[in-house]
Image (cartoon, coloured by chain):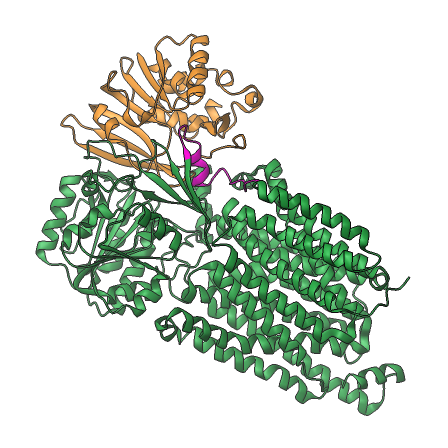
Chain colours: A green, B orange
Amino acid sequence: MMDRRKIRYSDYLALAILSAVGLAYEVLLLRVFSYSQWTHFASIAVSLALLGFGAAGTFLVLLGKRVDRWGDRLFISGMLTGVVGMLLSVLLPQWVSTRPLFAIWNLAELQKLLLLDFVAFIPFFGIALCIGQVFIRWPESTRKLYCANLIGSGMGALLPLCLLPRLFLEQMLFLMPIVLLMNATTFGLSHSGTRLAGRISLSITILASIWLAAGPPKIPVSDFKQLSYLLDLPDAEIIEARPGLSNQYTVVRSNSIRMAPGLSLQWEFPVPAQDAAVIDSDRVIPLPRSWEAFGHERAMLGYAPFLLRKGGPVAVIGASEWLSFGQMGNRPVEWVQDSSELAQLFTDRGLAKHVHQHVGGARSFLRSTQETYAVIYLVDCFGAKDSTSEDYLLTTCGITAAIKNLRPGGVLAIPISMEYPPKHAIRLITTLDAALKNSGARNPARQVIILRSLTEVLCLVSNQPFQQTDLDTIRSFSEKWSFDLAAFPDGSNEHPDTYHHLPDSVLYLSAKSILADEGELPESGQWYRTPPATDNQPYFWRSMRWKSVPSLLTTFGKQGLIWLDWGILATVIKAVVATVLAASLIILPLGRLPRGGAPVSRGSVFWYFGALGMGFLLLEMAVFQRCLLFLTNPVSTASLVIGTFLVGAGVGSLSTPQANSSKAAKRLFLPIFLASAFAFLVLFPGKDHLLAFPPLLRITNLIISILPLAWFLGRAFPWGLRKLDCQRPLIPWAWGVNGFISVLAAPCATLLSIHFGQPVSWIGAMTCYLLAASIALRWNANSGTISARGTSGPGQRRNCLRSR
Amino acid sequence: MVRWQIEKRGVRDKAVIKAMRTVPRHELVPPSEEDEAYSDHPLPIGHGQTISQPYIVALMTELLELEPDDVVLEIGTGSGYQAAILGQIVSEVVSLEIIGKLANKARRDLERLGYKNIKVKHRDGYGGDPKEAPFDAIVVTAAATHIPPPLLKQLKPGGIMVIPVGGKAWTQNLILVKKDEEGTITSENILPVRFVPLTRKRR
C-alpha cells in the first residue's frame, strides 16, 4: 500500500537530527582513524561518507516505487541500519586487531583492515537512505526538507567542537548511535505502522545508555603507536587521561620511560625517569616528575642555542620529545602550542611562572606578536609528521616569519631527526637557505650552524652572521660533548664526522653545496626530495621521490621499505580501493548507461555531473588544506569548512536559476568563477592579513570568503538535474556518476596538492567547472535549436518547455 | 636460510655463520610460529615482543667483532635466540630481560638446549649489570631515544656496542658504538632497521 500521508513537523525534526548525527559522525571518524590506526587513514572518513551517500542514492533508484510504498518503515530502517553500523564499528575492532604496516605484504591483514573500514561505511549508507528517501516522498516540500537537512548538518558540524573537549572518543562513538536511536524511537512511536520498530528502538536505547554509563569499550590502538609501546612496559600505568578537541591525552608512568634525544655519548650518568604525555596515541611529550635540574640537559644537543644566547626572551614553538624547559634557565619563555589540555598538564605540575603559555597556532603567533626573541626554538619539528600532513611552519614563509621575530643576532633553533640516507635534513637546509635569502642574507653559510649527534641534527640560524665568539662557544661545546659540526660559518669543520660516522659526509657536503654554493649535492643527498617547502605546497614531510624508490630498495633491500612515504602510498591504495568500491556500489548496480537524446547526450551527462563531483571535492579539500594555515586545529578546520560548504551549497541549491536560455548557463557559472577568484585572493595572496587578525575575526573572514563560493557551487547540480527532465532515465546516472567521481576526488585532491601544490588543485577544480559550463552552454544552445526546428516529440518538448 | 638470507647479504664472519647454522631457531619460537621460524622476517614471541629476523641477528653479531674469550652483555633477551648465537661464539653471555615471563622462558629454553655459558636475568637493561661489568661487547635489541650512559660506562676500552636508536616504535637506525683504548666513544650509522611490535593480548 502506498504511504500517502502528509509530511509533519516531526519528520523535519527527525531529518534534522539524523543529518546532524551523520555529519558529526564523519568528523568523529576523522579523529578515530587517526587515533587508532594511521594518521593518514583519517581522510578515509570523507571517502566512506561520500561512498555511503552515493550507494544509498543508487539503492533508492533501484527500489523505485517501493520507496513510497515502504515509506516510514524504510525511514526507520535507515536509522536502525545507521545504528547497527555505528555499534559494529565500535565493537569489531575489539575482536579484530590490525597491524596496518603488515597489510603491505600480508593479504589477511589487508582484508581485516578493509573490513573494518567498510563497516564504517554502513552508518553513512543508512543515514543517506533516510535523507534521500524524504526528497523522493515529498518533492513538493523540497525547500523545507533542504532547510531541515542543512540546519541539522550545521548543528552536526558544531557538535564535535562542543563535545570533544569534554568527552572521550569512545564516549562520543557511543553517544552518536544513542542519539540516532532516540530519534528512531521518537519517530517510530509517533507514527502508526512503525510502533513496533519504535519499541525495539527504545529497548536498544536503554541498553546502549546503560552500556555508555558503565563505560564503553576502549578504542583499541594499533600496535605501532607509541601509546601501545609505552603500555607494554612492565610497570606502566595510566595515571591520567583527558579528552580534547583535537587530541586525547594519556599520561603514562613507568620507571623505564627516559627520554633524552640528542644526549651526548660523553654523559656518564643515568637519565631520570619521566612521565610521558601521549597526545592521541603517537606523539610523546616528556612530563618531568620534578623540576629539579639533573645536569644531563646541558649535555644535550638542545642546550646549544641557550649557551649561545644566555639572556633575553625565548619563544618555544610546539611540543615534542625534544622539549626541555630545564635548558632555558630562569629567563622569560613564551611557550606557543595549540593544545589547552597540554598546557593544563604542565600547569598542574607546577610549570615555572617565567614560562608563559600561549595556546594557538604558530604562524598566527609569529605574524601577530610584537615581541622579538633572543631564541626561537621550533621543538615541534623533531616529531616527524605524516608525509600527507600540512606543516605551515617548515615552509620558506614559516621560517622567514620566525627569522623576522628574532632580535638582532638572535638564534632560531630547529631540531630534526637524522637518518641515513637523510630523509628530511637536506630539505630543511634548502628551506633555511631560501628563507635566509628571503630575509636579505647575502651569504647564508655565514648564518647557519648545524650540529649533529647520534641520530639528531640541530640547525642554528641567525638573522646576522655569527660572530667569532659564537663560533668559539659552539666549537668548545661540540668538542666537550662529542657533537659533529656539519655546517660551520668559518669553514673550519674539515672533519665533519669525527664522532658520529656516516657512510659518506652527506650532511656536510650538502650544507656546503646548498648554503655556500660549493660543489654538487652528493648522491645520497638526492635520494629524497630537496626543494624547499612553500606555503602553497606545505608538505615538508613528503620526502619520497618516485624515481628514487627502485634505488632505495636495491640499496637497502627490505629495510628500504620503511623509508618510503607510506602516507602517500596509502593514499594511492585508497584511491584504487575507492574506485573499485564506488564502481561496485554506485555505478554497476545502475546497469547500462541509457542512450540519451538531444539536447542531452549520455556522454555529456557523464562529463557534466562527473566534472561537478570532481570540481566540488577538489575545491573543498583545497580550502580545507589552506584553512589549516589559519586555524591549525584539524577538527575545527574540518567542522568550519565542511559546515560552510554544506550550508552554502544547500542554500544555494534553493536559488537555482529556472531559465533555460544560454544566459542562464552564464548566470550559473560566471558567479562561480568570480566567487572562486574572491576566495582565492583572500586565502592565498591575502594570507598575511588574515593571519594577523584575532581568532574570531579570522574565522568570520574565512566564512565570508568561502560562503559565496559554496552558495554558487550548490546551484549547478540541481540545474543540471532539471535539464534531465527531458531524459528521465538519465537522472539516476547523474547522481551515480557524481557520487562515483566524488569518492575518487577525495584521495585525488590530496595527491594533487602534495605533488603540484594547492593552487593547482584549485585550478583543477575550476577547469572541471569550466568543462561543466561549456557542456551547459551546449545543452542550452542545442535545446534552443531543437525548439526552433520543432524536432522533438510533443511530450518531450512539453517537459523541456515546462522546465523553463 | 644462511646462504640466501645471510651470506648473500654480505655477512662473512665464519664464527657467526657457523653459529647461525648450529642454533635451532625453531626451538626458540612459539610452537605456532615453528613453520615460519627460518623465514626472512621477525616473528611474534608474545608480550608484544619479537624475535628479530635472522639477517639482523647475524649482522648485529658480526658487527660486535667477537673473540672466543669475550664477555658479552645482551639487553633484551626475548626468545633467547640472539643469546644462543652469542653463546656459540664467546665464553660468557649475560642477558637482561625486563619482562619476567620472557626471562624465565628463555632461561628454561637455553638450559634445555644445553647452554651453560649464558646467564639470563630479569631486570631493566637501562642500568646494565654493574656486577658482571666490564664487557667486551654489548648488544641491545630494544630501541631507545638515547644510548643508556650506564651501558657505555660498562663497556671495556676497545669494546663495541650495537644498538638500534630512534624515537618511533618502528623506525630506528642501527648504530655501532666503539670505545677506544683511551675511552673515546664514537658511533657509526649502519642501516635503518624496523622493529614492529606484534599483536598483544587486548587489555
Please name whichever residue, A96 or A567, is drawn nearer the observer in this view of the structure: A96
Determine if the magenta segment contains residue A361: no
Residue A583 appears in the rendering: no
* Residue placed furthest toward the bottom: A788
Q: Is residue A302 left or right of residue A122?
A: left
Taking A396 as reference, is A494 above or below it? above
**Residue B170, position as x, y percentages in the image:** 43, 38
Start-end of magenta stretch:
A216-237
**Residue A386, position as x, y percentages in the image:** 44, 51
**Residue A119, position as x, y percentages in the image:** 66, 47
Taking B76 as reference, is A473 above or below it? below
Please name whichever residue, A748 or B88, is drawn nearer the observer in this view of the structure: A748
Q: Residue at x 58, y 58 (%)?
A: A24
Give the position of the N terminus of chain A as an image quadrant: bottom right
Q: Is residue A108 left or right of residue B102?
A: right
Name the quadrant containing residue B18. Answer: top left
* Residue placed furthest toward the right: A1
Give the position of the C terminus of chain A as an image quadrant: bottom right
